[in-house]
Amino acid sequence: MTDAVRTMTRRRSTFLMAMWALGAGAPLAALGWWLWTPLFYLGVLLLILGATWLLCVPMVSREPLSPAHRRYLRTFFPAMGGYVLAIFVFGFLQHVALPTWVMILVALLPVLPMIWVVVTIWRYTRESDEMEQRIQLETVYLTCGVVGLLAFAAGMLEMAGVYRFEGGLFFVLPAMFLIYGIAGWWCRRKYGLKGMC
């Protein structure tokens, strides 16, 4: 383990997450503008997430990361990178004439790294102290509640014929990660702590 990893702080990790989201969001939005509209929206969502994290950096503590948090970051970022890569592959192959079974595999490809992300968050919560577990419990509850209510409202509007949300299900998981970050920050501040979830 290098000194850089040992001295990783919450503030530095938040800054790196912001840079990752901005760095991934810009090419996704640009590519989506030309090729595939949902990819554009995903890029914009990542840009908003990155900008939000960047604004939060001054409010995040400089405390060193716990071993559980370091393990979480070491597995979270490769998984998110795999997700972005899988979305790129899907965006390129969506307009190619392929057999149905191949398109099913290509469409489900982004799900694999997301399974890795979900397991990573679960392991981080399980390996954390009681205070962090409580924060994570409240964060997950708020995330599920907010995204569930937004999805329900969107479904009701679509059923009423007021608005049609093209590819609406595609945005549920990115919205969960966005709300998860905001809710984690809010819950930590509520308990007098600084930093992201």
Image (cartoon, rainbow, N blue to C red):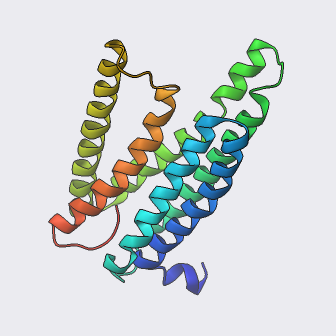
Nearer-the-camera pick, 166 or 93: 166
What is the quadrant of the N terminus in the image? bottom right
Q: Is 120 positioned to the left or the right of 130 in the image? A: right
Residue at 29% in and 25% down: 152
- Seen in the picture, residue 7 relative to 161 is either above or below; the reply is below
Nearer-the-camera pick, 39 or 118: 39
Determine the image quadrant of residue 158.
top left
Question: In x, y percent, where is residue 79?
Answer: 59, 50
Q: Is 162 positioned to the left or the right of 6 in the image? A: left
- Residue situated furthest front in the rendering: 162
Viewer can see residue 54: yes
Residue at 40% in and 50% down: 178
- Seen in the picture, residue 52 relative to 150 is either above or below; the reply is below
Determine the image quadrant of residue 14.
bottom left
Question: In x, y percent, where is residue 35?
Answer: 73, 37
Q: Is 97 positioned to the left or the right of 66 in the image? A: right
Residue at 51% in and 31% down: 170
Determine the image quadrant of residue 86.
top right
| Count of numbered circles on the image | 0
Nearer-the-camera pick, 173 or 43: 43
- Seen in the picture, residue 132 relative to 169 is either above or below; the reply is below
- Seen in the picture, residue 53 relative to 98 is either above or below; the reply is below
- Residue situated furthest left in the rendering: 191
Nearer-the-camera pick, 22 or 186: 22
Residue at 74% in and 27% down: 94
Q: Is 25 positioned to the left or the right of 9 in the image? A: right
What is the quadrant of the C terminus in the image? bottom left
Question: In x, y percent, where is residue 163?
Answer: 39, 22
